Image: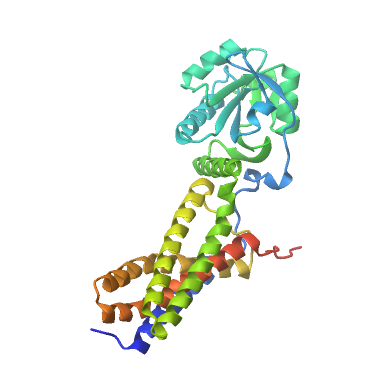
């Protein structure tokens, strides 16, 4: 059955309108305009604090400096081999992270807080307990004064010798933090995560993976230009769709077919670039707060839902034209057109809001 022309357009426009209205209502109802990213202690990036120069000794006996670790993302833990309780648990968490982060360039570093006992050979035995891969998990020691300055002053992690009375009450010989510290490229401190909290360790894993992908993308350079390329492809698709619509209304069917073929090609190229970018970079959070955050997420949600919807519509529309069923093709195309056009336009809007639009945070006292 062929749907009347005006009714076909109304169906497509109605799908767009209802999706946008429902997306907006959902975001207004459930989105926190000023979300907490996580516990404050887990996010130190705004301090932009760097570790500075250091020189330590790995269990193999080789020197490890700040320059060796600076190009990579790494996770630091603070332990000692004679520790009876907390350190085995911390090291098991690090072992789990070693497994989780397989396939990334993230490195792990267990830094001893008992360097007078933890010589490289002792650390080698300690590392063997946890099947530590020497290419991915370092065990570091060094002069006690240098180590403690690094831990206390630069990492700003607590460490101290306990008294005999404390040890009688069950305290460890050396009191130290059980937090794991995420360090970014350039040895910049980004966060401290509670190793006893599974959810915190999960957030650490996710943050390290995301940062690792971005670090690799930075090295390739061209990956970071893909959002602008994608926006250009979306804009080009919108122009081609409008041109194709105008051409078919004036009876220029061959030119219309050429425009729509190009629109499909541009959309396929966009999808390829989109997947490549997000493979390396992961999701990019919107930094704005307040009503603009709700508006952005409503547009993004409607864009995503309709992008999923329009793919089978495009395929069926093209198949009908290919088989010569032009009446059915035209009827479905009038439904597909407003959805496809909306997806292309909002693709540009999402790019602008996420990467270009200034989004000042609301003033608070």
Q: Nearer the viewer, residue 345 or 168?
A: 345
Number of numbered discs overlaid on the protein picture: 0
Is 23 displayed left or right of 116 in the figure?
left
Residue 137 on image: x %, y %: 54, 25
- Residue at 74% x, 63% y is 364
Is 319 displayed left or right of 124 in the figure?
left
In the image, residue 335 sits, relative to residue 64, either above or below, namely: below
Query: Going by the picture, which residue comes out furthest to the top?
Result: 121
- Residue at 57% x, 12% y is 122
Q: In which quadrant will I find the N terminus?
A: bottom left
Residue 20 on image: x %, y %: 47, 75
Q: Nearer the viewer, residue 342 or 261?
A: 261
Residue 276 on image: x %, y %: 48, 50
Q: Quadrant of residue 71?
A: top right
- Residue at 60% x, 40% y is 219
Q: Nearer the viewer, residue 340 or 207?
A: 340
Residue 289 on image: x %, y %: 64, 63
Is 35 displayed left or right of 237 in the figure?
right
Q: Quadrant of residue 212?
A: top right
- Residue at 67% x, 13% y is 116
Q: In which quadrant will I find the C terminus?
A: bottom right
Judge whether residue 22 can be spotted in this image.
no
Judge whether residue 322 can be spotted in this image.
yes
Q: Nearer the viewer, residue 38 or 297?
A: 297
């Amino acid at each position: 059955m062929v749907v009347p022309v005006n009714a076909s357009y109304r169906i497509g426009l109605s799908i767009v309108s209802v999706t946008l209205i429902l997306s907006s209502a959902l975001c207004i109802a459930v989105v926190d305009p000023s979300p907490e990213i996580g516990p404050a202690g887990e996010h130190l990036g705004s301090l932009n604090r760097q570790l500075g120069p250091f020189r330590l000794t790995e269990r193999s006996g080789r020197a490890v400096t700040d320059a060796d670790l600076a190009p990579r993302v790494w996770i630091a833990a603070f332990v000692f081999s004679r520790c009876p309780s907390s350190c085995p648990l911390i090291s098991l968490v690090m072992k789990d992270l070693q497994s989780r982060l397989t396939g990334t360039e993230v490195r792990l570093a267990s830094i001893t807080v008992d360097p007078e006992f933890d010589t490289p050979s002792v650390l080698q035995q300690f590392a063997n307990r946890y099947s530590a891969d020497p290419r991915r998990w370092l065990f570091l020691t060094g002069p006690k004064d240098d180590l403690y300055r690094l831990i206390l002053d630069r990492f700003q992690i607590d460490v101290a010798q306990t008294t005999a009375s404390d040890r009688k009450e069950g305290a460890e010989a050396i009191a130290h933090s059980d937090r794991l510290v995420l360090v970014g490229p350039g040895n910049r401190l980004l966060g401290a995560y509670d190793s006893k909290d599974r959810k915190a360790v999960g957030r650490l894993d996710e943050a390290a993976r995301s940062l690792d992908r971005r670090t690799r993308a930075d090295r390739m350079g061209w990956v970071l230009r893909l959002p602008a390329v994608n926006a250009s492809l979306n804009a080009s698709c919108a122009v081609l769709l409008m041109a194709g619509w105008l051409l078919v209304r004036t009876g220029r069917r061959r030119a219309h077919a050429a425009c729509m073929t190009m629109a499909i090609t541009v959309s396929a190229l966009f999808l390829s670039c989109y997947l490549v970018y997000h493979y390396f970079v992961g999701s990019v959070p919107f930094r704005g707060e307040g009503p603009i955050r709700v508006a952005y997420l409503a547009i993004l949600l409607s864009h995503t839902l309709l992008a999923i919807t329009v793919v089978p519509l495009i395929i069926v529309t093209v198949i009908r034209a290919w088989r010569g069923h032009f009446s059915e093709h035209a009827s479905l195309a009038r439904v597909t057109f407003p959805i496809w056009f909306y997806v292309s336009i909002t693709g540009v809007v999402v790019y602008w809001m996420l990467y270009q639009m200034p989004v000042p945070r609301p003033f608070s006292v």
